[in-house]
Image (cartoon, rainbow, N blue to C red):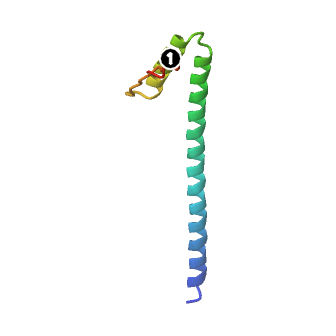
Amino acid sequence: MLTVRPTIDLAEAVSERLSLSLENARLIHESQRQAIKEQTIGEITGKLGSSINLYNVLVTAVEELGRTIPGSEVTIKLKDDKNGNG
């Protein structure tokens, strides 16, 4: 029975390293997803910033959202601040 403890210790060490490796892989994947999301937002923002009027900004926003999120439905409501009606 003296050989059982080293085997258990080895199994625990392997299990701990595997757990750390899986957590690192999850964190890397999450970071990559966040980077892609931020890159997409930056690209859309850049395109919106280059538009010279409100109509072009709205058209670009709708086009980019449709391209980025296929099947999405975009609704834009403009509100007249002078009388509070939409």
Name the residue furthest top: 52
Residue 1: quarter of image: bottom right
Name the residue rendered at 56%, 34% in the picture: 37
**Relative image position of residue 80 (x, y in whole percent):** 49, 18
Task: Name the amino acid type tagged 1.
Answer: Leu
Name the residue rendered at 56%, 23% in the picture: 44
Q: Is residue 14 above or below residue 77?
A: below
- Viewer-proximal residue, 69 or 62? 62
Determine the secondary structure under disc 1. helix
- Viewer-proximal residue, 10 or 53? 53
Q: How many marks?
A: 1
Name the residue rendered at 61%, 63% in the picture: 17
Is 71 displayed left or right of 4 in the figure?
left
**Relative image position of residue 14 (x, y in whole percent):** 58, 67
Q: Is residue 78 above or below residue 13?
A: above
Which quadrant of the figure contains the C terminus? top left
Q: Is residue 78 above or below residue 15?
A: above
**Relative image position of residue 67 (x, y in whole percent):** 45, 23
**How dense is the environment of label 1, judged by Cα within 10 Å: few (below 14), some, or many (20 and up)?**
some
Is 72 displayed left or right of 54 in the figure?
left
**Which residue bears the numbered disc 1?**
58
Name the residue furthest bottom: 1
- Viewer-proximal residue, 64 or 18? 64
